[in-house]
Image (cartoon, rainbow, N blue to C red):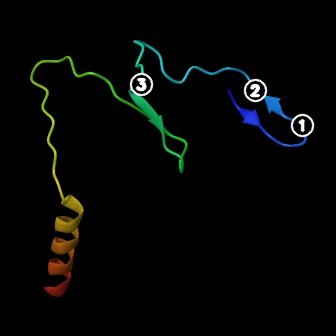
Amino acid sequence: MAVTPGAEFTVGAVRTIISGKAIGQGWDVDRTSGRIAATVPVTQAGVHMVVIQHWLESFTRKGAQSGSAK
């Protein structure tokens, strides 16, 4: 629901933002964007997760190298 604080506090209509199974504590709200991140269990066979650590440093380093080749 949309809430408008101020001299006259108003509350809008209720909106469904997540449906399906209950997600319990597997969610959070980004304070900057207001987006909601929710975890969903992976139940399909053959699904893989790839974790790349320090990817930003590698990306930055490669960008600097390609820029110096000009």
Q: Which amino acid does label 2 sit on?
A: Gly
Number of numbered discs overlaid on the protein picture: 3
Q: In this view, does 18 lie above or below 32?
A: above
Please name the residue that numbered disc 3 is placed on.
25
Q: Is residue 44 left or right of residue 21?
A: left
Label 2 packing within 10 angstroms: few (<14), some (14-19), many (20+): few
Identified at 16% across, 66% down, the residue is: 58
Q: Where is residue 53 in the image (x, y as percent from the top left)?
A: 17, 54
Q: Is residue 23 left or right of residue 59?
A: right
Q: For the residue labelled by badge 2, is the local secondary structure a helix, a strand or a loop? A: loop
Q: For the residue labelled by badge 3, is the local secondary structure a helix, a strand or a loop? A: loop
- Alpha carbon distance from label 1 to label 2: 13 Å
Q: Position of residue 39 (x, y in %)?
A: 34, 28
Q: Position of residue 40 (x, y in %)?
A: 32, 24
Q: Is residue 63 left or right of residue 5?
A: left
Nearer to us in this view, 69 or 45: 45
Q: Which amino acid does label 1 sit on?
A: Glu
Farthest right residue in view: 7
Residue 12: numbered disc? 2
Q: What residue type is labelled 3?
A: Gln
- Alpha carbon distance from label 3 to label 2: 25 Å
Label 1 packing within 10 angstroms: few (<14), some (14-19), many (20+): few
Task: Mark yes or no: residue 70 visible.
Answer: no
- Alpha carbon distance from label 3 to label 1: 33 Å
Please name the residue that numbered disc 1 is placed on.
8
Quarter in which the N terminus is drawn: top right
Q: Which of marks 1 and 2 is in front?
A: 1
Quarter in which the C terminus is drawn: bottom left
Identified at 14% across, 41% down, the residue is: 50
Looking at marks 3 and 1 on the same chain, the residue that comes earlier in the sequence is marked by 1
